[in-house]
Image (spheres, coloured by chain):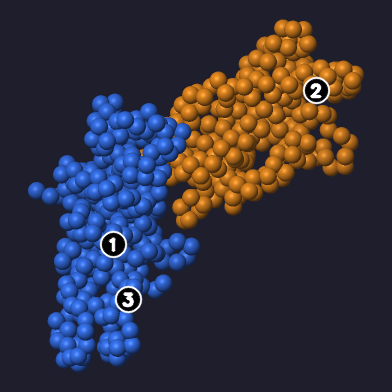
Amino acid sequence: MNLTTFAGAFQWQSRAVLARHVRVHLRNWHTVTLPPVCEPLIMLLTFGLGLGSQMGALRWQGQSLDYMHYLAPGILAYTAFMSSFFQSLFAAFIRMHFQKSWEGQLTTQVRLEHVVWGEALWAATLATSYAVVVCIVLAAFGAAGYLNLHWAWLPATIPLLFLTALAFSAVGLFFTAILPSIDHMSLPFFLVIMPIGFASSTYFPLPDVVGLREIAMLNPLHHLAEGLRWLLLNGEPTWHLAAATGLGVLLLMGLIPLDMRLLRKRVFGD
Amino acid sequence: MFHTLLDARGLEKSLGGKPVVQGIDLTCAAGEVLGLLGPNGAGKTTTLRMCYGYLRADKGSISIAGHDLAREPDQARRMLGVCTQDDTFDADFTVRGNLVQTGRYFRPRQPDLAARIENVLDRFGLREFAEQKPDTLSGGYKRRLMIARSVIHQPRVAFLDEPTTGLDPQARVAVWELISSLRAEGLAIVLTTHYMDEAAKLSDRLQVIQSGRVRANGSPADVLGDVVGEHVVLLPAGTQADAALAWFRSRGLRPAQVLASWHIPLDAQGLAAFVAAFPDLTYEVRPPTLDDLFLALSGEAPQ
């Protein structure tokens, strides 16, 4: 493994690219903050309160709990996954292909490894900030008496959410590198987002389908959702958190060098 | 005293398994404009992209202001500025924001970046558009912004890849003036262009690239002499020209047809032989221009 690939994450050029994305985002803070606030709000109201009241209690790990409590940690995990993947796929593709801002950056002291790390770090930062917004929404529901979580653990989830979001951004960048055009953008949604989402126990417990639990064991989103659930519902850090961390690190170590190689070919034709 | 700021030796590059650049040397001194000429696909942009570190050379070395691009990429890249063929400014920022953001991509930072930006806005005539997004600018002002961005960090070498393509004559002249003023400041400028008048007016030296190799190198007059010859015969197209064309082709010459006439470059000896062979034919003889050079190269290059 080439260590310089990972050293790029800590170089000033990657931070300069990250700072560029932060600067653009903050300029539009009033519009870009709406989705991360509205989405969990709508999810908790419609599914947590609405659907949850129709469902009654459900069984999770031998415990009986209402759907609102099952859903809350799942939303947190899914936000980190979805925001990061979407940003590193769709937004990065637009910057690379249509805006040509990558090409502009690459004519300076910024090199491809910095552009890639800048995109990955930005996707993870944005996803984590969205997850923080979700935490605030959850806290508001707690204050209103609808949720009872182990609140003290909530800040401790942030570093893990960042790491897993960074790993998911590497998956997004993989598709940025290989998709021939924006018309093919629906493919990763069907091939990655939906399967990973469905096999993850974020929004509902895994059904008893042959092989599904085994597949879920390899799904970092599943471990993230379950780990957060154990942590926030029972106050127990479990092996799921370690599994989410380990799978996240593995994804990063495997995919970032591959992303760089594929993007080098795509951007430079090299 | 001029000193060499760009020194590229033995550059080679294959793309997709196809050799695109095959052993090109390139030098440019402070206060010099080097014009890179050649037909489409000759390897000009690939050569330029290697020189500014966008592409990695398969073979060869590149030194920018004394810094080896492969061994000291940060130091070498700090010394160069690039205006790409396509507009690659950041559409999320205003004109001023683009200059600020580009300045942030260089270390050590330009010490007086804010003052430098104000100066560049005035000098490039961008002041009144400073708070507008680049996509609201006309083609000429977009190119001005691209060049302004390429020099915001005060580089020593500037690479300008077809900086006036698509501009109207007035906008082209304005860009020429900017390029001349950058040369007067002591920048080494490497320029690619398809406009022969532009190459002749701006370049101190021309380097002609064909099929990934240097075909000729020197002052515009020297290059014309090397590649085209001393004279160009303009022969009206038509049946009366057929015999003459056959005569030229039998001597290994490749007449190029431009609208209603054939252009044939000849040296003095060839012209004398042609005059003797076709005493009754009507034609025009004039000195060669860079357009003839381009036609000659296009005729020779594999299409």
Find disc 1 in the rendering and name its residue. Answer: B37
**Splitting the image into 4 quarters, where does residue B208 fall?**
bottom left
| Colour used to depict chain A in the structure image | orange
Q: Which of B110/B270 is in front?
A: B270
Crowding around mark 3 (Cα neighbors within 10 Å: few <14, some 14 to 19, many 20+) is few
Q: Position of residue A3 (x, y in %)?
A: 48, 42
Q: Chain of mark 3?
A: B
Separation of residues labelled 1 and 3 (CA atoms): 26 Å
* Host chain of mark 2: A
Q: Which residue is mark 3?
A: B260
Viewer-side residue, B123 vs B184: B123
Front of the two marks 1 and 3: 3
* Residue neighbourhood size for the residue with mark 1, other residues' Cα within 10 Å, grouped as few (<14), some (14–19), many (≥20): many
- Whether labels 1 and 3 belong to a single chain: the reply is yes
Q: Looking at numbered disc 3 in the image, what kind of residue is underneath it?
A: Ala
Q: Position of residue A120 (x, y in %)?
A: 54, 35
Disc 1: host chain: B
Circle 2: residue type? Phe
Secondary structure of residue under mark 3: loop
Tags 2 and 1 on a common chain = no
